């Protein structure tokens, strides 16, 4: 039995007839850009997040760029964020001309450490960009208190957290703007690139809508330099079919996470991911990320070998495919050499990058496959 780290083929098997006829409808309508399917998705997505406005765009990366531009963030501005995320989080900040300022993460939650944010604030700081990494929500109440105190904006990176809530309120409804990705591997995936921004502010919504269409409030009147970043009708129709299923899919992810947690507890060389107390919110489990640390009596004597990488290779040999999110922290990426972060400047983030391993988790993962993942991990752990 071979278990892929992620698979869409089973979901497709369930949805193929519905998706096929809906796509056919769009093809026959000839309405590929904008139109009723896009309008409907924006309406229903806003409703599901509990905000007044959702604006579809081309990707999660573009959602971040549109959000930062709408808040007038650019040259000379600083945005506080995390270096333990997908590269796009920081890239969007840089691409609007601002400077990402990285704050270390909490070793248990992997989320931006709210104890470290205040000391990173300077007169140039304009916004905080928290990432609800792997589907775990950031403590938004605490973050909003901080932002209010220093009059900072909040842009939430919700790319991995569709379906997550904090204190019963969906992520993407807390900050000034929420940014979502519908890349196929996210909890709500399109059939290609797609994204959306969410907000309760009418002016921000309008601004982002214009920026996504060449800064054009009226046809051929350009009040801003914008982008071509629209949500296609073909993607919208796919999202319209999938959105009503998101809740149940996240429920299945939670069940798998619970099962992994129950079965893998107390093993000597790895630690399990944080959950969120049900009264605080809901983890959307886009990833189930364990940390593998070297025990004192390790049979692996080669000092150059990271134990995590040894686990990954052994698991692969036995048919369990895992992924490392993320092997290189953003501040250590060659593209950010100019920011001159030194090795050791974000110790928790850097350490995590050598320890983390994402186990297969997706709604269609069968009990037998979950058991195999658990069995193989336990077998390896017994060597220690
Ligand atoms: C996927 C992702 C993005 C970017 O989304 P795309 O749709 O791929 O552009 C941004 N931030 C995080 C945390 C992500 O996981």
Image: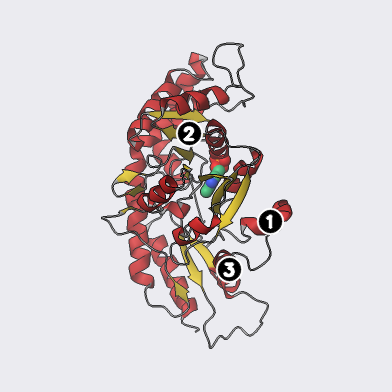
Q: Is residue 77 left or right of residue 320?
A: right
Disc 3 to disc 2, C-alpha distance: 33 Å
Front-lying residue, 15 or 263: 263
Quadrant position of ligand 1: top right
Give the percent coordinates (x, y) of residue 81: 54, 51
Give the percent coordinates (x, y) of residue 249: 36, 46
SS assignment at label 1? loop
Name the residue carrying label 2: 196
Disc 2 to disc 1, C-alpha distance: 27 Å
SS assignment at label 3? helix
Q: Is residue 93 left or right of residue 250?
A: right
Q: In the rendered structure, which disc, 2 or 1, sits on the residue that comes first in sequence?
A: 2
Q: Is residue 363 visible?
A: no
Q: Nearer the viewer, mark 3 or mark 2?
A: 3
Q: In the rendered structure, which disc, 3 or 2, sits on the residue that comes first in sequence?
A: 2
Against 300, is 141 above or below?
Answer: above
The colour scheme used to paint the residues is secondary structure
Instruction: Tell me, for residue 333, which label it has, or none.
Output: 1
Pointer 3: residues within 10 angstroms few (<14), some, or many (20+)?
A: few
Pointer 2: residues within 10 angstroms few (<14), some, or many (20+)?
A: many
Instruction: Tell me, for residue 294, which label it has, or none.
Output: none
Give the percent coordinates (x, y) of residue 150: 46, 47
Q: Residue furthest front?
A: 123
Question: What residue is rendered at 39% in x and 63% in y?
Answer: 274
Q: Looking at the image, do the residues carrying marks 1 and 3 touch, with CB atoms under 8 Å apart?
A: no
Disc 1 to disc 3, C-alpha distance: 15 Å
Q: Is residue 207 visible?
A: yes
Name the residue carrying label 3: 347
- Mark 1 C-beta closer than 8 Å to ligand 1: no
Q: In the rendered structure, which disc, 1 or 3, sits on the residue that comes first in sequence?
A: 1
């Amino acid at each position: 039995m071979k278990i892929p780290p992620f698979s869409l083929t089973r979901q497709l098997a369930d949805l193929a007839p519905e998706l096929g006829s809906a796509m056919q409808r769009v093809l026959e309508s000839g309405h590929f850009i904008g139109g009723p399917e896009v309008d409907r998705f924006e309406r229903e997505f806003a409703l599901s997040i509990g905000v007044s406005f959702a604006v579809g765009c081309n990707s999660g990366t573009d959602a971040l760029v549109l959000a930062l531009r709408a808040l007038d963030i650019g040259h000379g501005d600083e945005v506080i964020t995390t270096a333990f995320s997908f590269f796009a989080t920081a890239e969007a900040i840089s691409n609007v001309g601002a400077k990402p300022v990285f704050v270390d993460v909490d070793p248990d939650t992997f989320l931006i450490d709210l104890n470290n944010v205040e000391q990173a604030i300077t007169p140039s700081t304009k916004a905080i960009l928290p990432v609800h990494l792997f589907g775990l929500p950031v403590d938004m109440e605490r973050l909003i208190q901080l932002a209010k105190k220093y009059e900072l904006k909040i842009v939430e990176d919700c790319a991995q957290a569709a379906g997550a809530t904090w204190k019963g309120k969906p992520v993407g409804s807390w900050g000034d703007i929420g940014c979502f990705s519908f890349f196929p591997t996210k909890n709500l995936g399109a059939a290609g690139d797609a994204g959306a921004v969410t907000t309760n502010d009418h002016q921000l919504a309008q601004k982002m809508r214009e920026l996504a269409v060449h800064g054009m409030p009226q046809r051929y009147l350009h009040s801003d330099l914008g982008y071509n970043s629209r949500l296609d009708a073909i993607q919208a129709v796919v999202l319209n079919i999938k959105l009503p299923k998101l809740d149940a899919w996240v429920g299945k992810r939670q069940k798998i996470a619970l099962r992994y947690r129950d079965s893998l507890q107390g093993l000597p060389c790895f630690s399990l991911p944080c959950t969120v107390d049900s009264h605080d919110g809901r983890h959307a489990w886009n990833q189930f990320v364990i940390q593998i640390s070297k025990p004192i009596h390790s049979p692996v004597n080669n000092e150059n070998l990271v134990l995590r990488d040894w686990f990954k290779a052994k698991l692969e040999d036995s048919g369990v495919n895992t992924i490392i999110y993320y092997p290189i922290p953003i501040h250590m990426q060659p593209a950010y050499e100019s920011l001159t972060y030194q090795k050791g400047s974000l110790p928790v983030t850097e350490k995590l990058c050598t320890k983390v391993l994402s186990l297969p988790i997706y709604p269609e993962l069968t009990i037998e496959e979950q058991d195999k993942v658990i069995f193989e991990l336990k077998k390896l752990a017994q060597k220690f």
